[in-house]
Amino acid sequence: MRDLATTLVEQPYEDTATTVTTPQWSDVIPIRGLSSRQIEAVIGALKTENLPDNWDGYGSPPPPQRVVNISIKLLEAIPFDDLPVPHVVPVSGGGIQIEWSIGQRELELEILPDGSVEFLKAERGQPLEEGKLTSVASSQVQSLLAWLIPG
């Protein structure tokens, strides 16, 4: 998938002699009822696996396929009805962080290289709670997201 993902993030090449088009994301990401916001977040996770070794200047590897897969599974399990597209960024050491900010509230989910998932809730820039998720499809995730959305 790495080569296909690399191809997909590149812009189509066009000149007067040749036009090369790239596949649509829907051709390689199983849609299974995903919203456009979920798809955009999944694309962010896929892009992290294309990072070179030492991408951060501290010797970090790109997130391994296992971490990317867990990130995608997590994003697929989250209903995006009231959520904006999260920022999906690599983390030093080979992890991926998924982060939302709504008003004064922030929620970060970090998938660590060992496959575990940690969370951090913050309000007005101050940490409120942090811990480990028991499962990416748990009621704990739903509870965290319910806290994030005010009202």
Image (cartoon, rainbow, N blue to C red):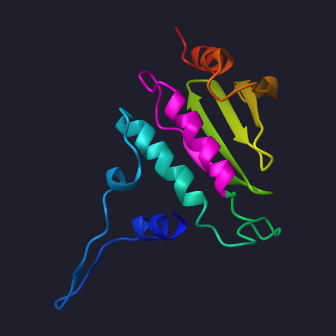
Image point (61%, 42%), residue name:
71
Place residue 34 in its image quadrant.
top left
Image point (33%, 54%), residue name:
27
Determine the residue located farthest toward the left in the rendered image.
Answer: 16
Name the side, left or right, on which 136 lies relative to 26: right
Whether residue 83 is situated above or below residue 140 in the rendered picture: below
Indicate yes or no whether the magenta region holds residue 73.
yes
Indicate yes or no whether the magenta region holds residue 13.
no
Q: Give, as a single range, the part of the protein colored magenta.
A: 65-89
Name the side, left or right, on which 7 lies relative to 140: left
Residue 144 percent coordinates (x, y): 65, 19
**Near-viewer residue (47 or 70):** 70
Name the side, left or right, on which 151 lies relative to 32: right
Whether residue 50 is situated above or below residue 34 in the rendered picture: below
Whether residue 53 is situated above or below residue 17 in the rendered picture: above
Residue 72 percent coordinates (x, y): 55, 42
**Near-viewer residue (95 or 29):** 29
